[in-house]
Every structure is written in C-alpha cells, then in structure tokens.
Image (spheres, rainbow, N blue to C red):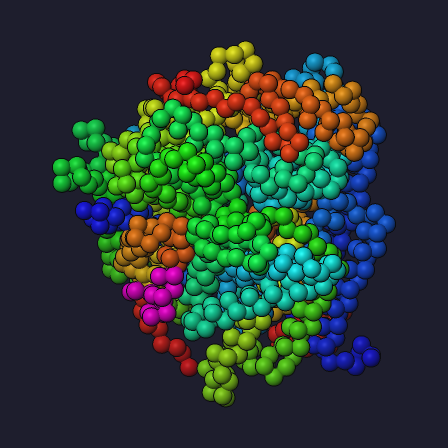
Amino acid sequence: MKLKKVLAAALIGAMTLTTFGCGGGDADQGAADQAGDATAIKVGGTGPLTGGASIYGIAVQRGAEIAVEEVNALGGVQFELKMEDDAHDAEKAVNAYNALKDWGMQLSLNSVTTTPGIATSELNAADSIFGLTPSASGTGVTEGKTNVFQMCFADPNQGSASAKYISDQQLGTKIGVIYKNDDAYSSGIYETFKAEADALGLEIVSETTFTTDSQNDFSVQLQDAKNAGADLLFLPMYYDAASLILNQANAMDYAPKFFGVDGMDGILTLEGFDTTLAEGVMLLTPFSADAEDEMTKNFVAKYQEKYGEVPNQFAADAYDCIYALHQACTAAGATPDMSAEELNALMVEQFTTMSFDGLTGEGATWGENGQVSKDPKGMVIQNGAYVGM
Amino acid sequence: MEFLFNLISGISLGSIYAIIALGYTMVYGIAKMLNFAHGDVIMVGAYICFFATMRFGMPPLAGVLLSMVVCTMLGIIIERLAYKPLRQAPALAVLITAIGMSYFLQNSAQLLWTSSPKVFQSVVGTINGQTGLKLFDGALSVSYVTIVTIIVCVIIMLALVTFVNKTKTGKAMRAVSEDKGAAQLMGINVNTTISLTFAIGSALAAVAGVLLCSAYPTLVPTTGAMPGIKAFTAAVFGGIGSIPGALIGGILLGIIEIFAKAYITTQLSDAIVFAVLIVVLLVKPTGLLGKKVSEKV
Amino acid sequence: MNLKTMNKTTRSNFITYAMVIVAFVVVQAMASTGGISSSLKGQLVPICAYIVMAISLNLTVGVLGELSLGHAGFMSVGAFSGVIAAIYFGQTIENTAVVMILAMAVGGFFAAVVGVLVGVPVLRLSGDYLAIVTLAFGEIIKGIVNNLYVGMDANGLHFCMIKNTLEMEGGKMLLNGPMGLTGIPRIATFTMGFVLIMVCLIVIFNLVNSKSGRAIMALRDNKIAAQSVGINVTSYKLMAFVISAAMAGMAGVLFATNFSTVVASKFDINTSILVLVFVVLGGLGNMRGSIIAATVLTVLPEVLREFSEYRMLVYAIVLIVMMLATNNPTLKNAISNFTGKFKRNSGKGEKVNG
C-alpha cells in the first residue's frame, strides 16, 4: 500500500508536470513560431500515420510534402506543412487537430479518412479554419459546413457514377457486390451504388460483406456470387482486400469482370503482387500513376526518388490540395500574417468560384456544399498497366 | 457440393487458426500467461520469410528456417527483457507488459518495413501450374497450402505431445505448469523451462506466420493481430493447455466461421462465431478437451 | 471533521474526492484564463470518460476480482443508446444539462440491461474463461451495433437490423450501420464529466464500504469460504458487474456527445484493453490510482507528439518500463524503506482504498 501511495504521488507529479509543461510550452512555441516565421502560411492536417490505415495517411503526408516543396520554390505564397497522427480514430483526430491549432494552423487539410474527418470538420466550422480534405470522401465531412471542401469524389458520386458507367457501357447484366461492412467508405459507396443500380434497372444478384476482422477468407462471398451467376463483381474497397479477392477468385476458377473504385488504385504497385491476376479489372479513378502527361510524370518521378515507391491516389489528392490552396491564396492575395478567419473567408470565396487543373482531373470546380465535380476516368488494366476505357 | 465446398473452405481457414493456436496454447498452458504479443511474433516471422525469399532470393525452405531462427531469438529476448522480471508479479501485470510488447512490435515493424502491404509469395509451390488439388472434375479444389498446413499441424501436434509427455524436459514443463513452487523444490529450473517454452512457442509462431501469409498473402504490420485473437479464442474453445484441443478448436472455429457466413449472413459472422463460443463454454466450461479441475478447498 | 480521527478508509476516500475537486477547480480556472493549450482543452471530456471507464472496470477487476476484456462493449451500448436519446430529447428540450442527464439515464439503463444479459450466463465461469467470454460479448455487441439502423421522423424512432429497410416519412437517419452516428449534438462539457466522476466515486466508495461491498470482496478473496457463510455468489457478483456496466454506459454517453461522430468499431477490444491498462497500472482496487493512470496515459500520447512517427513506439516502451518498474522487487523494497522512515502508522491488509 505504501508503494502505491508513493507511486500515486509520483504520477500526480508527473501529470502536473506534463500538463503544465506541455500547455505552457506549446503556447510559447506557437507564439514564437507565429512571430518569427510569418513568411509562410501554416497548413495542417490529420491522418493515420500509425496503425492499420497508416498507408493512406503517410501517402497524403508525402504527396503534400512534395507539393509544398514545389510551390515554395515558385517564390510566391509560401506554405509550411504539418501532419499529425490520428490513427484513423475520431477521438485522436480531434486531439491532433487541437495540437495543430496550438501550432498556429491557418489552413487545414482536415483529415485523411472519413470518420475522423467528420469529427474534425465540425471543428473547422466552429473555429472558422478553412478545410480542404484530400481524401475523406464521406458526405458527413462536408454536410452542413460552409468552409470544408473535398478534393476527392464524395462517396455517393462514386457509387452512382460506377452504376451509371456499368449501365451505359453495358458491362454486365448480373451484378455481384462485396463490400466492407465496418467501413464508412466502402458501405457508403455500396449504398448509393445500389440505389442508382436499382433506378437504372441493373440486377444485383449477390450482396455479401466482410469486416476488418474477417478480411482473410472470401471463399463464401465469391461462391455466393458465382452461384448466383454474377458476371460482374463490384468491389468498392481498398486494394489490399481486393488483391485477396482477385487471388482467391482465380484459385476457384471464377472469372467475372471486376469493377473497382478509386480505392482500387495501387493494386498494380503492390509489392509482390502478380499483376496478371488484375488483368481486365476496371476501375473509376481520378488518378493513375501511369498517365503520360507531364504533371503526373514529374510527380511520380519525384515521389519515387524521394520515397522509393509509386504514389497512389491519396498522394495525388494531397498534392492537388496544396496546389489548389496555392492557386486560391495567390488569386485572393492571401498573406501569412492573415488570421485563420480572414483566410477562411477568402478561401471559401475562391473555392466556390475557381476552376482547378490538377493530377486528379482538369477543370475541377466546387459547389456550395463543398463537393468537387470533376470527371472520373474509366480505366482498365491491360498487360499490367492502366489503359483508358 | 456446396456443403463440401464450404466445409473445405472452413477447414482451410481453420487449419490456419489451428497452427497459430498450437503456439499459443504451448505458452499459455505452461507459462500460464496470455501472450498478446504472439500474433505479432507471427507477423515478424512472415516478414522475415518474405524478405529472405523475395529480396534475397533464398529458397522457400531456407526462408522458413531463417524466420524460425529469428523468431526463436526474438521470443527469447522478449521473454528475458519483458516477462522474466515479472515472474513474481501478478498475472495481470504480465498481461499488460505483453500488450505493450505487442504495440512495440507492430510499431517497430511499421517503421522498419513501412505500412505498404506486401504480397507474400506462397512457400508452397504449384504442381502442373495448379495451386490446388482438383476434385470432381475441377468442381472442387483443395489448395496445396491447406494440405501442407494440415500436415504440418498434425506433425507439430504429435511432436509436441510426444515432447511434453515423453521427454525429461517435457515432464519438467508439465511440472512447472502444475505448480511452480513444487517444481522448483524438485530441482527443476523454472526460469529455464519457461524460457524454453517461449523459444518453442516463437518458433511455432514463425511457421504459423509463413503459412498464414501463404494462404492469405497480404502482409502488413497488423497482419498477426486479429488472427492472434481468433487463435486464442480457438485455444480456449479446444481447452486451454490441451495440445490436441488447440488443433480441434482451431479447425472447428474456421468451419463455424465459414458456415455462419454461408448459411446465415456474412454481416454478422463474427458475432455468430463468438456466440457459438459462449454457448460451448457455458455447456462445457473448460473447453472441448479441457480437463475439469476440481477446486481446492 | 478531523482528518486525524477519521477511519483510514474514509480518509483515503476523502483524499480522492479532494484530489478530483482540486484538479477540476485548477483546470477550470486555467481554462477560463486561457492558460491551457487547445490540445489539452479538447481532451478534458475524453479524460473524464476514461476515468469513469477505469473506475467502473476497477469495480469488476479490482473489487470483484474477475477479469473483463469486453468493457468497451458496455461503453458502446451506452454511447449509442444515449446519443439517440440525446437527439430525441434535444428536439423538445432546450437545456443541454437536462438533455445530458436524460441521455445518461438512458445510456446507463441500456448498458445495465445488457450487463444483466451478459452477466447472468458469464458470471458462472471464472478466470480466463470468463475473460474470453467477456471478450466475445464485446465483439458481439460491436457486430450488432455495426448492423443497426436507426432513423427518426415525425412518428418517432424507427429501428431495423442488417439491411436498411426503414420506411420513414421524411425524417433523418441517426445511426446508419457501419457509418455510425453522425451529426451528434456536442453537448458534453468538462463540468458534466466532473460531476459524473464524482457521482461514480460516491457510488463505488459507498458500495465498497457497505455490507454488499464486503460480501463482494469476500467472494474475490475466497469464494468457497464466502459461500460457506451464506453469501449468494451470483447475486453479489451480478450486482457489481451491472453497476460497473451502467457506469461504463454513462461514460460512453459522455464520450460520444463530445464528438460529432461515433462508430461501432471504436469500441473494440483495443479500447477494452486500454481501459484495463489504466486499471492495472493504477492498482487493482485502487480508485485513486485508476484516476491518475487514466489521466496520465490519455495525455501521454499527446505529449509524445514531438516524437512524430516514433510516438507510439515510445508509448509502448513507456508502458513496458512502467510495468517493470512498479513490479520490481528491489525498487519496491527501496521505496518502502524510504517511506517507512516517514510513516510508521500505516496499517496492513487494506485492500480497497481511495
């Protein structure tokens, strides 16, 4: 018992020290930064840099870093970037957002994933800090907020665009869907896909799900689709799960057409993946690392040189975010000494009126609701590379 | 035919759980500790094998052996640094340390090997270009990985049972598991025995990791976490500390999971698996093959 | 009252109350003068929720002596039912404090009901088997909430499972399966968290010092001896378990109403384990320890942000080192020798204190 008391006392001491120490320290640092380094606008974002979803957060961080280096080299409006870890969790995202606020964040990249994004966008709105999320695609992120915008397609747009595409191109008559039942992204796309497919008269013959906990074995789901005679399998999910599905479908000699969404991008650069399995897979994505235009080539080369891997769509979205912010700041004549609130008003005005050309689409515009409108590109994988459809 | 297909799928999945559960039950049965880091040792084993075969072009068998050696060493180091100092501490303290170790291994793996998924090349090759044995004119297929996993499971189970029951060290292990104090009085070195248990458990984890990733080839730093928990469930299901129980528990768990998905709903399959577990434990509170321990008064 | 003449347990309890009150007053004062960072300010409510989680789990693990790995499941039940209640009552009631109290009552009630449903079968098991079954229940609750759809329109609330088949006249979706609850009114405040902690502490301390509390602890220390003197095992175990579940439910309400969104997968085994870490590190049966451990370990990852990508690695190392240090016999002796010089009157056998 004595020991516990001493320990308790020690812990109280430690707690007080950390609380006060960190509180005071952060405030001082923030003030010092703002005073000493008012040459750059502070851009902050939260994303999963650790844990199971960290691949997306790290990609965003890296894509944004490259873009910041590039725009700063142009000599105009200067940016300073800081990403904080949210481990794909709303609670930690709010902590990360607040840490960024203490740092003196003036513009925000909101969050990388949807659930954290819904929590932080609420704060963006409350604090009047402008938010442009690279990849949090849920509708809840922008809904009801006037100053949060998306760089990626909102989930409903992806779902309905996919259904329209399949219907227009007559890609399949009997459709099977496998989606991830504990993931807002996957189930969000599925819901709108189903609604649109029903409206267009597409026949969905098999609907099955999986969760993070059972993301190993897809034999039952594939067998269900096969028995129902599905000739097209819609896979609204990320490529790690999709690669397993392709692998297992191949092992059971089931070869329908596969149709994916933007999360499928990255499957070709998966280390060790047999790309012949992905032959003929179709996906709607705004970005492909194999595109031949100057901008993409330059970005992919830089990314590979710096980080030794091929960038995915998340990195591209983040890269575009920085350029879009840069374009808006330049047009509005924003300067680093402006407060977050002043910048917020300028940015909202710019984003609802401007048109932006980036890696992930040309002539992108934003509506009042914060959702982007740009054209998704239909891609099909042939000989281990994307080809436009 | 569909029933057979589901049964085969269930056994495939279950054999993976079984092989992880064997390592789990070894440590759990002897050292009486819930080693939450076991799943992460599995992940390390898979990464070692991946790099050995993919990056350095070693033959699959050499890769497996290398990963067994590395994991054994890792297991011993973890035990020495984190668990051994807590030999006299309450069981819950060790549990928390094991959780800390699990976080440590996952985060180290992320820093060392990044979180980009790697696709593991099956260590089980193909025969005539086929990855599985075709039955009924190709209507059904049993993958070679499953066959190898089941064979390996049975071999490991028999070896462990023989080792624990017949050898002197094995007897020492059982003595330690029954009563540490009495074992020590009989001249058994309790510390060495427990360390040895960890070494064996970790070597088994390496094998399990390689086979897990051969069957389900996506490899990320969190690969071991969920299968680890499921395998622990399987070990409890079969009866904690019972080596054949781990094998049976693992396979049954796999079959139940697949049947729940196929015949009830994919959406609630995890919940159904756990519900079955609860019912079994309520009917048979010490698992399928667990011994009924009479309470000391 | 004279601190010196008080009985030891009462004194210890009063120290705990005083600690919580002082911490609240100090932080509140600092917050009003702008003396704390937004980072810490944003964590105040979650810290309160985790403290309630920790002391409620301590009731199960420390006082009742049964290991539970599914405590987050009760938090989940409370969070979802409480938030739906908050939205429902929020339509007609303006005062957020009243809405919060109603939401807490609903959340706590549903968590207690689930606590009974889980407790009746589970508490017949013991030890590791009980632990695995609580883990299983936690996962089942997660799976069910993940497939639950709740909508609200002019006719009231609508529920359905698995597939969204709600037929509503206008209205809006509240709980949308895996996409979780969105648009939650963020009504939780630090003061509410503080009040909840105090209420839970009062309940727990009074329980522990009552006849029932002594019966519960007797079960922990020696079940057979306790049974032989006529203590009803099931009912006392269930009592502790259900109270613990209800408190976790209320913590869930507090937690969820601090964020604008909450998803079922948040309350998984990792959260259960996190809370267990607070309890073990703070000391079994030691409520004050749980409060401190919950606070320190919630703040710690934020303080470690300076380590950027090494943050969670450092956190893991700190966790292991803390466990090793607090259980190191040499260190223990050194400390007890050291403190022994100052304190000679400490009693023995005190199992539960503030």
Q: Which residues are magenta?
A: B275-289
- Relative to C350, B73 lies left or right: left
- Is A301 or B67 nearer to us in this picture? A301
Q: Is residue B57 in sight in this rendering?
A: no
Residue C317, placed above or below residue C92: above
Number of numbered labels in the structure image:
0
Identify the image quadrant of the N terminus of chain A.
Answer: bottom right
Please name the residue shown 69% across and 15% down the image: A73
Please name the residue shown 60% across and 48% down the image: C182
Q: Is residue B280 magenta?
A: yes
- Is C4 or C127 nearer to us in this picture? C127
Q: Is residue C36 magenta?
A: no
- Relative to B136, B223 lies left or right: right
Please name the residue shown 60% across and 63% down the image: C107
Residue C103: which quarter of the image? Answer: bottom right
Residue B285 image offset from top left, x and y in percent? 36, 69
- Is A367 or A131 nearer to us in this picture? A367
Residue C72 image offset from top left, x and y in percent? 54, 58
Find the residue positioned furthest to the left.
B137
Residue C176, placed above or below residue B50: below
Please name the residue shown 81% across and 60% down the image: C25
Identify the image quadrant of the C terminus of chain A.
Answer: top left
Residue A178: which quarter of the image? Answer: top left
Q: Is residue A354 in sight in this rendering?
A: yes
Residue C221 image offset from top left, x and y in percent? 52, 77
- Is B134 or C127 nearer to us in this picture? B134
- Most common secondary structure along the magenta stretch: helix
